[in-house]
Amino acid sequence: MFRLWAKIFKDNRMLRDLTICDDSREKNRTKKVFDALDEVCYAFDLSRPIWLDSNIKEFQRVDKTRFRKDNFIDDIDFDFLEIHVIEEDDTY
């Protein structure tokens, strides 16, 4: 099972969180991450964030990244959106 935990923070407080589960065997890890992020953005009513080089490197290193105002085209009313892979299949 693949699980991604998304959290919205403002002033060092978590405002909202959501866990997305995906037990599909047909998708690769990248597809699962992007699909989960799409679900998070839909649930939180956000535009899809832009992956900057710093986000890619951080996510590859620790399976976690933060999207700040520079990652969004629209204005956001929080400090950052953090995503973190908390469980994944052993089939990669």
Image (cartoon, helix red, strand yellow):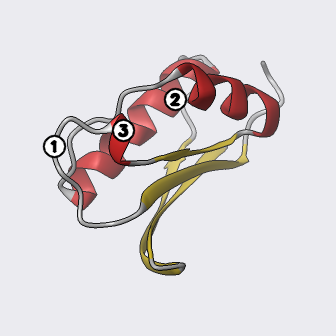
* Residue type indicated by callout 3: Asp
Residue under the point 79% across and 22% down: 91
Measured in 3D between alpha carbons, the distance from the residue under mark 1 to the one under mark 2, in whole angstroms, is 24 Å
Dot 2: few (<14), some (14–19), or many (≥20) neighbours within 10 Å? many
Task: Kindly indicate whether the residue at mark 1 contacts the one at mark 3 (C-beta within 8 angstroms).
Answer: no
Tell me which corner region of the image, top left, top right, bottom left or bottom right, holds residue 29: top right
Three-letter code, disc 2? Lys
Task: Judge by depth and name the residue closer to the eye, 69 or 31.
Answer: 69
* Residue 58 percent across, percent down from the top left: 70, 33
- Tell me residue 90's x, y (percent): 83, 30
Q: Is residue 78 visible?
A: yes
Closer to the chain start, of discs 2 and 3, is: 2
- Identified at 41% across, 63% down, the residue is 79
In space, the residues marked 2 and 3 are separated at their CA atoms by: 24 Å
Q: Residue 36: which disc?
A: none
Residue 21 vs 63, above or below: the answer is below
Q: Which residue is mark 3?
A: 70
Can you say whether 11 is above or below 1 in the image? below
Q: Name the residue type under label 1.
A: Asp
Q: How many numbered markers are drawn? A: 3
- Please tell me which residue is depicted at 20% across the width and 35% down the height of the picture: 73
Tell me the quarter of the image containing the C terminus: top right
Q: Nearer the viewer, residue 42 or 72?
A: 72
Q: Residue at x 45, y 25 (%)?
A: 51
Q: Which residue is mark 1?
A: 74
SS at badge 2: helix
Dot 1 crowding, Cα within 10 Å, few <14, some 14–19, many 20+: few
**Residue to which mark 2 is pinned:** 32
